[in-house]
Amino acid sequence: MTAVLDSARAELLRLRKWPAVWITVGAWIALALTFGYVFDYVSYATGTESFATEGTTAGAARDALLTGLLPQAVPDVLVQGMPMFGGALAMVLGALVAGNGFGWGTWKTAFTQGPSRPAVVGGSLMALSAFVVLIVAITLVLFTVVSAGIALTEGEAITWPTAGDLARAVGGGLLVLQMWALLGYAVGIIARGPALAVGLGLVWALVVENLLRGVGSLLDAIEQLTHFLPGTAAGSLVGSLTGTGSGTPGVLDVIGGEQAVLTVAAYVVGLVVVVLTVMRRRDLA
Amino acid sequence: MDTGVNETGELVLRTDALTKRYGDRVAVDGVSMTVRRGEVYGFLGHNGAGKTTTLRMVLGLVRPTAGRASVLGRPAGRADVTGRVGALVEGPGFYPYLSGRDNLRSLARYRHLPRAEVERVLDLVDLAGRGDDAYKGYSLGMKQRLGVAAALLGDPELVILDEPTNGLDPAGMADMRELVVSLARGGRTVLLSSHLLTEVQEICDRVGVIDHGRLLREAAVADLRGGITVRVRATPADTALAVATRMAGPDGVRTLPDGALGVGLPASAAPDLTRALVAAGVDVHEVAPSERTLEEVFFEMTTGAAAPGSASNANMKETVS
């Protein structure tokens, strides 16, 4: 275990000093903030409220918009961007962390330091997971501050979300991002480089799965298959937390929440096994 | 045995018919080599001869197709072995965006070493002043030196350096030679792979010569070179031969291609030999110490191995290069 922790510390040192990691994290924060708060708030603030709209559907929509920006809605906003760009960025992060070591020769260097290969790779996965936790933590703090700010500005009472809602959202978000990060990591390992891994991964997550779900509505066999795909599972997991009423892209209700959690968790475990198995025996040039 | 240590205790590295095939291509073909504790072992071969692949197997980076390698008495590549070995193989592998110092700090964490150890090895390779610069900005020589510094982290029992002078200027090469010699003097075992033969001749105790994946010979440098002989040109030749034979013994004298005599005596015996020749009434035209260079021996060996008529080697040349 010491060897795994030593390896994780070594990997953390190089990850936290890597600009590419912070660019990826920053991109997520910027996107999540923009789509979670900025657009909705601008739309709310520039909308007009008068006696004419009060009590009508337009007024109700505007109220709903504000409700979605207040602290109580933080759990929903936290996870709603994760099936789409959150997952994609986590996958990029995983592919970068795993894939570059082949071209740079740093896997070779790490494997000749003392810790066994499983320990080195295990440490690397721990470091990657630490960044996934960090991403969720930063987002949570930021969203809380922003939503509280909006509540104060708009003169609304601050109602905090329940601990249960928050815990479910944080747990679900961690699972979804971890799965995508591991998927990127695994493809980075198999492809021995980040470029192909990022490219294929994004095409898969953003295009192929959507196409398959489209075809699935015509062909039953394909539909059954899509129930087990990572995008479906992640989207349905988030859908079970937030509901699919908002029409956020990627948020689904294809499979039930429980099945979604199990599928995502199975991917997490399975991908760790794949990564450790591949790296254990591979020849490193 | 001069050390009194038993044979296996003395061996730091041993390979046993180590073989690596990539499809039809045989990169390493039944290499059995031994490196003894405390020596500087030169691993010689042309580019593509199989040196690096052998070293990768020794480090556990590549799995042998057949045969075995053991390091410090344990199977190569085991976690409890790699921590006691320092290596620079096939160029340094570092994170380009990190400074040289941070790269080493990361490696020191794998090895559970204190930060002071990083400063020690940076000093050793004269990089302390540039330690905070990003690795990607380093010159080829600095990158190589950082690689050597990494190999010295934690003062390992066996240091494996694959072409450590690649990319170094003459002054850098001299520094590197000095560093390797000082390592050996400190009791460290060094396995040095190189195609720079003068470098190896100067600093290595024993060498293994590999060509087309096969270990052609493993011997002490002095044995390979055949030792120093005294070259004598004198007339009349038969009297000179008789005198030389009396001093060096019947097996100690051979007639060289140009008619001169190669006398198997140390250079310090030249005055005595000259006196004896003159006393016997021989005219002495030339007396000089002579020794074949490792380079001459190496080329003799490697060109011989690939000579026409040696069909298997000729085939291997096709498949290896």
Image: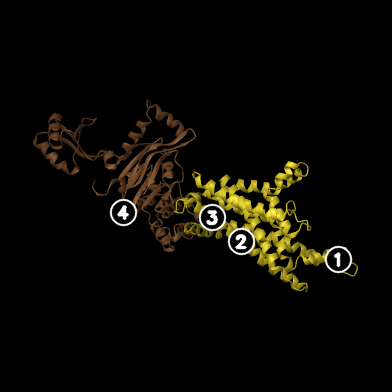
Chain colours: A yellow, B brown
Residue occupied by mark 3: A124
Query: Label 1: few (<14), some or many (≥20) within 10 Å?
Result: some
Q: Residue type at mark 2?
A: Val
Secondary structure beneath dot 4 equals loop
Q: Nearer the viewer, mark 4 or mark 2?
A: 2
Q: Chain of mark 1?
A: A
Find the distance from the CA under tag 1 to the CA under tag 2.
38 Å
With respect to residue B39, does B258 lie above or below?
A: above
> Both on one chain, marks 4 and 1?
no
Residue occupied by mark 2: A133
| Residue at far front of view | A258
Say whether residue A29 is visible. Answer: yes
Residue occupied by mark 1: A59
With respect to residue A73, does A125 lie above or below?
A: above
> Both on one chain, marks 3 and 1?
yes
Q: Chain of mark 3?
A: A
Q: Nearer the viewer, mark 1 or mark 2?
A: 2
Q: Residue type at mark 3?
A: Ser
> Both on one chain, marks 3 and 4?
no
Mark identifier at residue B187? 4
Identify the mark nearer the N-term, 3 or 2.
Answer: 3
